[in-house]
Image: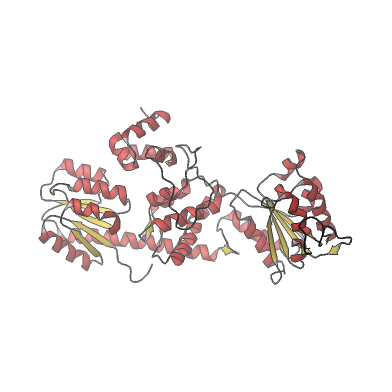
Amino acid sequence: MTDHWRPTLLVVDDEPGMLALAGRLARDAGFDVVTHANGREALQQLTAINADAALVDLQMPEIGGLDVLRAIRSAQPGCQVILMTAHASVETAIEAVKLGALDYLTKPFDLERLQGLFTTVRKGRERREALLQVESDVGKQFEFHGMIGPSPVMQELFDAIRRFAPHIRTALVTGETGTGKELVARALHTLGGRRDRRFVTINCSAVVETLFESELFGHVRGAFTGATDTKMGLFEAADGGTLFLDEIGELPLPLQAKLLRAVELGEVQRVGALEARKVDVRVVAATNRDLLDQSAAGKFRSDLYYRLSIVEIRLPPLRERREDIPYLTAAFVRDCAARLNKPLAGVSVPAERLLQQAEWPGNIRELRNVIERACILSDGRILNDRELLAAMPRSPSATASSFSTSTAVAAPGAQPPAVSRHNRLRTVPREQIERTLKDAGGNKAEAARVLGVSRRALYRWLDRLDLTH
């Protein structure tokens, strides 16, 4: 947490004297203060203020305090709202609490009580930021060659990489898309004594099949139409270092035999050349496919598979290591804050819960992209759940019981795709819909408002989830 940070309090009241009194007390309690003399003015400036807390008068002309409370809770869920009124009633107090108000004060209110509420808000925010800092520090301590993982499964993985790296000549790294297979390959390269030599990468799914042999092994001048110069292949370029073959499962079958020869004998033959050349290359291959199944189907050579998989390192998907999500999130927010020059400290508790519940089919790459988009959109210090939800790409196959997101990488600064109020429910877990209904006392109109959808859309989803009883 930065030393100069001060929380912001929004005060909304049509009495100038009350604005001055509340402002003075809040500044003394360590807040920056923004005041508005009516609800309409406050709502117009709501997104620009990004307040940590709000002190709102219940009875004001045009737009009353409960409407302001609803708008704040919808736009800024992390903002703590305190309602105040000269005409208190049990009914309004209960409604205020149901809508998420922190407290309900009667004018003239107890100054010590108000100061205590200010302290509660400030200390709560400070504790959250302190916890986020701890998570960031722990993530740094458990960082391993660009990978972060305090979880036991990742610590075992890091230990395996340390043990294997000095000895292997070939390795196969397996795991779903976005789990960090290239980071494992680079760690093997760095820890294996070849850190001062080249680390060469080729994506086997991105090269035209007719040019693949030339890319891997090179060619001599005149070997084929267009070969106007002699060219060194990637095996020769990686001599003494490491060649990383990403998406090895996409390698054409005819080339697999030549790759096997290069790996086993340590020699390559340029296209059109008569003699082979010796190379000393560590080959690390990666795939998100099951190569044994591919081999059984005749799509991958079994002898090449067994040669590459003398050491096989499996990366677990993010859903199998959810305890790492807070530390990964802290690292991504920290990096984005530095790059974007924003005072971002982390995510709110509801936002962290949302990240824990998401399915993450795109794994760590997807998590990083979502955090980056949310950081670009945010103007505050703490990312809230709505900002993260807006940053999550939508998939046509998404369901209401899970988050299903695309793995496409958005360009920096790109806006998230537009989502209709109806489709927004597809990204909300069933448990969250049930909890929102319960918190609203069964009031479907209120639940729809909290979820940010129309009542008609909510009713449709309740029918679909069999929650109409």
Measuring from the top left, give residue 202's x and y in whole percent: 69, 57
| Display colour scheme | secondary structure
Name above or below for residue 443 compared with residue 179.
above
Q: Quadrant of residue 447?
A: top left
Q: Is residue 319 above or below residue 225?
A: above
**Residue 97 horizontal/vertical position (percent):** 24, 45
Q: Residue furthest right?
A: 274
Taking the spot 75% from the left edge, 50% from the top edge, the residue there is 210
Splitting the image into 4 quarters, where does residue 333 fall?
Answer: bottom left
Q: Give the image location of residue 448, x and y in percent.
A: 32, 38
Foreground of the two, 369 or 190: 369
Residue at image position (40%, 41%) is 424
- Lateral position of residue 58 relative to residue 195, left or right: left
User: In the image, 371: left or right of 256?
Assistant: left
Residue 456, horizontal then vertical, whole percent: 33, 32
Residue 51 in view here: no
Front in this rendered view, residue 69 or 263: 263
Task: Say whether residue 324 is left or right of residue 116.
Answer: right
Residue 140 appears in view:
yes
Instruction: Say which of 434 and 179 sits in front.
Output: 179
Split into 4 quadrants, where in the image is the C terminus?
top left
Count of numbered circles on the image: 0
Above/below status of 391 relative to 127 = above
Q: Quadrant of the N terminus?
A: bottom left
